[in-house]
Image (cartoon, coloured by chain):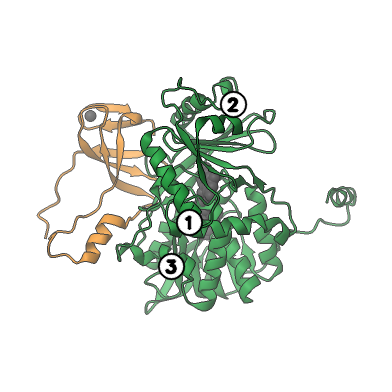
Amino acid sequence: MSFKLISQALNRNQPPPRMWRQHPLKDRYDVVIIGGGAHGLACAYYLAKEHGITDVAILEKRYIGAGGSGRNTTILRSNYLTPEGVRFYDESLRLYHQMALEFDYNVMFSKRGHLTLAHSDGAVRTMRRRAEVNRLQGVDSRLIWPEQLKALCPPLDVSENPRHPIQAALFHPPGGVIRHDAVVWGYAHHADRMGAEIHQLTEVSGIRVEKGKVSGVETNRGYIKAGTVLNATAGWCSTISEMAGVKLPVTTFPLQACVTEPLKPFLDVIIVSGSLHVYISQSDRGELVMGASVDPFASYSMRGSLGFTEGLAGHMLELFPSLANARLMRQWAGLCDMTPDYSPIMGFTPVDGFLVDVGWGTYGFKATPSSGKRMAELIATNKTPELIHPFRLSRFYEHDLVGEKGAASVSN
Amino acid sequence: MVLLECPNCGARNVAEFRYGGELKPRPAQPMAGSEESWVDFVFMKQNKLGLQAEWWYHRAGCGIWFMAERHTKSNQVVKTYRWQPAEKAS
Ligand SMILES: Cc1cc2nc3c(=O)[nH]c(=O)nc-3n(C[C@H](O)[C@H](O)[C@H](O)COP(=O)(O)OP(=O)(O)OC[C@H]3O[C@@H](n4cnc5c(N)ncnc54)[C@H](O)[C@@H]3O)c2cc1C
Ligand SMILES: [Zn+2]
């Protein structure tokens, strides 16, 4: 790869190959996917790869990865609280494990081990339950005590000194991190090569529905007819669904994250504290990547706030007193489409041909491969795959929620 | 948004308040409405991108619940006011 890079840098006549091409916009596609995040691109990828459906356009109002897919903190894990959630996220994690091979592209997946800290008896009980639910689904997950934790993560303060001493942790060895941009570009590249069209700077402004069936979408580049329309716009999903007259139980909250200056390698596991609402991992470049929970009020604004930095720093120092002099380098925010049960919404809506892949909240990046694969299957077969049946929109009317609050509220 | 105007206490740091969600019309006849209308009321959201009427609670102050009209993209608050029950619900 690097030799290729050098030869191309020196050869002025030969333009480097494009990761994906530009196309004129057609006036009709079998499938229109709204939102060029990892989810929309993964769905296009699987439509082509597994079902031979390539008359597909991905419409993205800005650039691909402009949303949560390019802003997240890349934590991948499957130690959720409900059996439905564990099964779904575990398929996704397995697909992530083989992604680099499948793409022939370095997505920098790094298996770290994921540790969720418990600071109270109640939290220890929840961890115990999670560990059992996880193990029943064949997922490696267990409770460990402060001495074992100290051995895995020496800089962590496991003493009785902090305000909320650590009592135990849920240890999930397969958890890891990945390069989010590479995931977005990898899906885009392969979806493009198999025939799907990526249209950036193409904003959907309306959806036409005739006799209860979707017929096309209005965009800033004109009207496009479509057989199937998929809403994969995460934080903006309510604005798109409203155009089709579909109600969603979603509220959009900003979620912030930040990184420190690069430090010598000192943290090779992922640490999450549910009670303190903070999490941390160290990137391959040495930066500490940190985040907290969503902002305290709903908003479509992506501005950082001092309240976030102050709160995060305070809690982080309780866990890692040695970080007192580390300097913050950058801070940013993305939008999260939160649902009442902290589970996603995938599948059919009351409007025929209008599908949703939304409600990914603060935890949707890890779900990308599986949601793409299963939504593609749903589009190709017109049937809901069993794995994602629990996450259908109608669950709210059927009083059949999938409560993941205990495992998904810590924003990763 | 750094400051929010409580109708009782005036402008205060927004950290003193708790956000209470968008204003939603409650089913007028609780017992008569369909189950579906209750699901809509409890779970479904407009989640508006634009000017939104919403609830706030002055948690670390006088303790009242009140309304604000805020632009959800710029976070600019246009006004805050005490909640008034709508004209006789039909
Ligand atoms: C700070 C932060 C940290 C996170 N950390 C993690 C983590 O550690 N692990 C994890 O699993 N998840 C994490 N998440 C959540 C995760 O990022 C998201 O759930 C996921 O990226 C959603 O992907 P998506 O493809 O569905 O949506 P997005 O990537 O948000 O893409 C939606 C796209 O739709 C486009 N769009 C919007 N409106 C229109 C329109 N009208 N027309 C055309 N296009 C439109 C947007 O421009 C955007 O590009 C985090 C999120 C944030 C913000
Ligand atoms: Zn007050």
Query: Whole-Å distance between the Cαs marked 2 and 1?
Result: 32 Å
Which of B22/A328 is in front? A328
- Chain letter of mark 2 equals A
* Residue A293: quadrant of the picture: top left
Disc 3 or 1, which lies upstream in sequence?
A: 1
Name the residue furthest left: B88
Q: Nearer the viewer, mark 3 or mark 1?
A: 1
- In the rendered structure, find residue A389 and report the number of the disc placed on it: 3
Is residue A12 left or right of A385 when viewed as pictured? right
Q: Tell me the kind of residue under disc 3.
A: His
Which of A64/A150 is in front? A150
Q: Is residue A57 above or below residue A336?
A: below
Query: Whole-Å distance between the Cαs marked 3 and 1?
Result: 20 Å
Q: Which chain is green?
A: A
Callout 1: few (<14), some (14-19), or many (20+) C-alpha neighbours within 10 Å?
few
Kindly identify which residue carries mark 2: A155
* Residue A401: quadrant of the picture: bottom left
Q: How many marks?
A: 3
- In the rendered structure, find residue A154 and report the number of the disc placed on it: none
Callout 2: few (<14), some (14-19), or many (20+) C-alpha neighbours within 10 Å?
some
Query: Measuring 69% from the left and 70% from the top, which residue is drawn there?
Result: A194
SS label for mark 1: helix
Is residue A158 left or right of B29 when viewed as pictured? right
Which of A169/B50 is in front? A169
Kindly identify which residue carries mark 1: A136
Query: Measuring 51% from the left and 24% from the top, which residue is drawn there?
Result: A317
Q: Specify whether residue A51 is in view.
A: yes
- Chain letter of mark 3 equals A
Q: Tell me the kind of residue under disc 2.
A: Pro
Q: Position of residue A406 (x, y in %)?
A: 40, 46
Q: Is residue A42 above or below residue A323?
A: below
Q: Quadrant of ligand 2?
A: top left
